[in-house]
Image (tube, grey):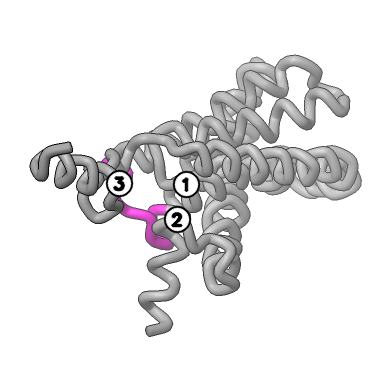
Amino acid sequence: MSQQSAVATDDTLTPDTEKPTSPYRWRVIDIVVASVLGVAAGLVFVLWNIVSNPISAPLAVLLPGLQALVGGGWLFAGVLVALVIRKPGAAVFGELVAAAVSALVGNQWGPLTLESGLVQGLGAELVFALFLYRRWNLPVAILAGAVSGLALAINDLILWYPGSGSAFSTIYIVAAILSGAIVAGLLSWLVVRGLARTGALSRFASGREARTRKA
């Protein structure tokens, strides 16, 4: 083997000389972790399908439309997965996987659960896309949750509350946005920060940023 060939072979095997992969390209670990998070969120969805009913009914009696405050319990999967993975499509992926788990286990919405998951995931995805998948701070997370809540409200008003009056629709939309901002946005951001501090996200940018802040 010539010296030139040997050098070329050594360069190929040296990690420092490998071409960097695109920050937008999904790795195998991204798919695995996003799937695990999506399934875990889906199990929370299943529980929330049951727990939310006794909460939403009194809210609806108190002020029709206020029941949308429980909506955040079905919105956090997209924001959570996106904050961890930080890749295009992560919000839609996370919300769809969680919705699929909820639908497979069984709920009152059936196949429309997947449609809702897609719409809600797209709402959050739009915000991260607007920031070119480069901003993952608290304000962006809250905005993503809020827009996901808006998407939920519009979808619900079309599917489940057609012909609703302007007062009901306004209250429903505002309540869903607030719920999305707090539960899907703020709480998801806090969860990711907590996970990052434990070192569980060490192979992700979200985990490396946490270590940098501590240093």
Classify mark 1: residues with Cα within 10 Å, few (<14), some (14-19) or many (20+): many
Tell which of 60 and 88 is nearer to you: 88
In terms of secondary structure, where does tag 1 sit? helix
Residue 8's image quarter?
A: top left
* Amino acid type assigned to the residue bearing label 3 in the image: Leu
Quarter of the image for the N terminus: give it: top left
156 shown above or below 9: above
Residue 94 vertical position relative to residue 82 in the rendered view, above or below: above
Residue 13 is labelled as 3
Which residue is identified by label 2?
A: 204
Residue 85 got which mark? 1
For mark 2, give the secondary structure: loop
**Kind of residue at disc 1:** Ile
Q: Earlier in the sequence, mark 2 or mark 1?
A: 1
Q: Can you say which quadrant of the picture contains the C terminus? A: bottom left
Q: Residue furthest front?
A: 1
Q: Nearer the viewer, mark 2 or mark 1?
A: 2
Q: Is residue 69 above or below residue 213?
A: above
Q: Is residue 26 in sight in this rendering?
A: yes
Distance, label 3 to label 1, CA atoms, is 27 Å
Alpha carbons under labels 2 and 3: distance apart: 23 Å
Q: Horizontal and vertical percent for residue 128?
A: 37, 42
Q: Are marks 2 and 1 in contact (CB under 8 Å)?
A: yes
Q: 103 or 144, which lies in front?
A: 103
The boundaries of the magenta stretch are 132-140
Q: Are marks 2 and 3 in contact (CB under 8 Å)?
A: no
- The residues tagged by marks 2 and 1 sit, at their Cα atoms, a distance apart of 7 Å
> Principal SS element in the magenta part?
loop
